[in-house]
């Protein structure tokens, strides 16, 4: 589809565990990082929702409501406290 | 002259032997029995000496002092037997024409006595059985101990580090003068402390109220089987003193909390957060922010970890990204989610490495970036942390002007009851959601008319995880619902309750809340 974009997504901690992978290339019609996360949350049954995670785009923390450009590397970061 | 005596020392008698009309300086050293050693309360000390060798070796030391320094005379006397707190254990005196030589000779004699005389010290502790400590050169004597050590030399200890071309004498001296607090002496804390203590940080504080457990040993390598059941801060400090006797260590055998955090943090130049929960992390973070102390924070999860440094607080803080303390349900302790020991050992080592660099201004630090490490894939990601002008702590218009206890409350601490009675539900007015586990056909008509409906486990799961209102789960007798609620409570969800006694105990005053 015309409005679909391809991005690389990396997963950390519980997101990696639930998706059983460290990274993948995703083709999505989502327009923002938040929409993309909600889509992935449904696919992989992530135990965290979009209010509980942060996003980094091309190695900088970003805003979940920013528009997906296509081609970027996206990391969804859950809070981690283990020590 | 050296004397070994089991009688109280009379200083005036000793001084009388030293007096000399030519002497322009008399320097005396008095070694006293103190009430603590390596963090433990001491009630008394017992000295035992192998006297013949003490005298021979002692005479040699005095002769060396006379030869090295321009003194007229130098002498000493050492006690044996049981001494109480404050008693004089050893006295050294030196006379010289000028004070410099007298000071130097006095110091030389006491330093050498400490490491060369066959004198053993038995400490009587307030809290546990007594033990022999500080046995120097015991192995040479028929004493029954074999744990003697040679004289400790800082130059020898740090020989390899000093050979490092990127690490100057000034850098080393800076480390020796630094005071670093490590909060939490567990998986991250053990390696961090080891690196700090063995690389020359002069003064280390440890804060931890936890005790050593068997399941800690696979990653917390300052502890052994013998430490199980003991306080971590104390056992870590004892082990570190063995690794480097010259380091000064304060063992705070307590968790940091709102009451003690400011008092403890203010004693140090830099703080390393090695805790394992958000409450402690936010408490330490905000304290360092308000005290303007550099903070090095890390967390681990299974094979992964992240580390971030806050050295210049004008460049942003944790709350720039995570404005509120994350929910407890996000936490997952090492025991629950599992951890590969390499993750905390690596991240804790990185924390100490960053601390050494910051304190000595070496290399380039991780400032303004978080480093994410995945040891399963060998991926290292440095992620830029921009300052957020809307940050509640360091933003342009901060909401958090000072620390307050409610900022560090975690819902788990409320310890709410799992069950809620019908009357308590009525008191909630409409600020709750009632969900029945049973199939629609199992729910009696009168309850359905009042708004009680059947929900699948999936629907209940979504509500518990996302709805901000209290969730009341019901069934006929309140047994299945209690089991389900317990499962969510164990995961940290505190907003969910089971209706006590189930719908069989419904009162007519009960109305369902607003869905």
Image (tube, coloured by chain):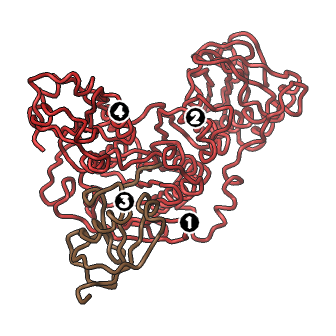
Chain colours: A brown, B red
Sort mark 4 into few (<14), some (14-19) or many (20+) by Cα contacts within 10 Å. Answer: some
Q: Nearer the viewer, mark 4 or mark 1?
A: 4
Q: Chain of mark 4?
A: B
Asked whether residue B291 is in view, the answer is: no
- When the figure is inspected, residue B370 is found, relative to residue B59, above or below; the finding is below
- Can you tell which of label 4 and label 3 is closer to the viewer? 4
Secondary-structure class at tag 3: loop
Q: Which residue corresponds to mark 3?
A: A45
Q: Are marks 3 and 1 in contact (CB under 8 Å)?
A: no
Which of the 4 image quadrants contains residue B235?
Answer: top right
Q: Which residue is mark 2?
A: B212
Q: Are marks 4 and 1 on the same chain?
A: yes
Quarter of the rendering occupied by the N terminus of chain A: bottom left
* Callout 3 and callout 2 share a chain: no
Comparing labels 3 and 1, the label whose residue is closer to the camera: 3
Counting other residues with Cα less than 10 Å from the Cα at mark 1, is it few (<14), some (14-19), or many (20 or more)?
few
Q: Earlier in the sequence, mark 4 or mark 1?
A: 1
> Answer yes or no: do the residues labelled 4 and 2 have beta carbons within 8 Å?
no
Callout 2 secondary element: loop
Q: Please tell me whether mark 4 sits on a helix, a strand or a loop.
A: helix
**Residue B336 horizontal side relative to residue A61, left or right:** right
Q: Which residue is mark 1?
A: B376
Check disc 1 and report its element: helix, strand or loop. Answer: loop
Please name the residue shown 21% across and 21% down the image.
Answer: B505
Judge whether B166 appears above or below A45 on screen: below
Determine which residue is flagged by label 4. Answer: B480
Tell me if label 4 and label 3 are in contact, CB under 8 Å. Answer: no
- The location of residue B458, given as percent across then percent down, is 31, 50
Viewer-side label of 4, 2 = 4
């Amino acid at each position: 589809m015309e409005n679909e974009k391809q991005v690389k997504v990396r997963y950390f901690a519980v997101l990696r565990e639930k998706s059983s992978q460290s990274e993948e290339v995703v083709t999505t019609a989502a327009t923002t990082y938040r929409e993309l996360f909600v889509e992935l949350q449904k696919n992989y049954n992530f135990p965290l929702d979009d209010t509980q995670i942060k996003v980094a785009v091309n190695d900088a923390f970003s805003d979940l409501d920013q528009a997906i450009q296509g081609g970027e590397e996206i990391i969804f970061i859950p809070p981690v406290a283990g020590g | 002259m050296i004397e070994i005596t089991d009688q109280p020392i009379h200083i005036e008698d000793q001084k009388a032997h030293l007096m000399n009309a030519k002497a322009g300086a008399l320097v005396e050293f008095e070694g006293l029995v103190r009430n603590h050693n390596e963090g433990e309360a001491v009630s008394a000390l017992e000295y035992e000496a192998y006297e013949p060798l003490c005298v021979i070796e002692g005479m040699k030391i005095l002769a060396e002092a006379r030869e090295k320094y321009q003194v007229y005379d130098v002498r000493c006397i050492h006690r044996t037997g049981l001494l109480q707190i404050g008693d004089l254990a050893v006295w050294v005196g030196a006379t010289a024409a000028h004070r410099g030589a007298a000071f130097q000779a006095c110091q030389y004699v006491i330093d050498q006595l400490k490491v060369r005389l066959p004198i053993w010290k038995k400490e009587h502790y307030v809290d546990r059985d007594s033990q022999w400590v500080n046995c120097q050169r015991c192995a040479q004597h028929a004493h029954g101990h074999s744990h003697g050590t040679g004289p400790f030399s800082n130059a020898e200890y740090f020989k390899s580090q000093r050979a490092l071309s990127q690490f100057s004498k000034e850098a080393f001296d800076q480390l020796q003068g630094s005071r670093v607090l490590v909060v939490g002496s567990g998986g991250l804390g053990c390696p961090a402390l080891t690196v700090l203590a063995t690389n020359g940080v002069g003064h280390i504080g440890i804060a931890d109220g936890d005790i050593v457990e068997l399941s800690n040993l696979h990653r917390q390598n300052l502890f052994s089987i013998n430490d199980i059941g003991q306080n971590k801060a104390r056992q870590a400090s004892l082990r570190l003193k063995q690794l480097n006797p010259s380091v000064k260590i304060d063992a705070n055998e307590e968790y940091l909390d709102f009451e003690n955090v400011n008092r403890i943090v203010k004693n140090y130049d830099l703080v390393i957060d090695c805790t394992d929960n958000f409450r402690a992390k936010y408490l330490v973070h905000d304290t360092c922010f308000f005290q303007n102390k550099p903070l090095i924070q890390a967390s681990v999860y299974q094979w992964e970890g992240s580390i971030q440094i806050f050295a210049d607080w004008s460049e942003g803080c944790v709350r720039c990204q995570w404005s509120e303390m994350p929910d407890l349900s996000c936490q997952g302790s090492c025991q629950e989610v599992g951890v590969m020991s390499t993750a905390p050992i690596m991240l804790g080592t990185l924390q100490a490495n960053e601390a050494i660099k910051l304190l000595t201004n070496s290399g380039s630090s991780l400032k303004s970036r978080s480093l994410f490490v995945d040891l399963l894939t060998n991926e290292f990601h440095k992620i830029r942390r921009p300052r957020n002008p809307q940050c509640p702590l360091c933003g342009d218009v901060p909401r958090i002007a000072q620390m307050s206890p409610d900022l560090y409350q975690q819902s788990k601490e409320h310890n709410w009851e799992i069950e809620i009675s019908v009357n308590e539900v009525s008191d909630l007015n409409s600020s709750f959601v009632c969900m029945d586990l049973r199939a629609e056909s199992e729910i009696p008509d009168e309850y359905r008319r009042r708004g009680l409906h059947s929900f699948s486990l999936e629907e209940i799961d979504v509500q518990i995880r996302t709805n901000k209102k209290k969730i009341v789960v019901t069934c006929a007798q309140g047994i299945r619902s209690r089991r389900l609620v317990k499962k969510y409570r164990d995961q940290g969800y505190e907003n969910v309750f089971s209706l006590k006694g189930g719908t069989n105990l419904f009162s007519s005053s009960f109305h369902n809340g607003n869905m």
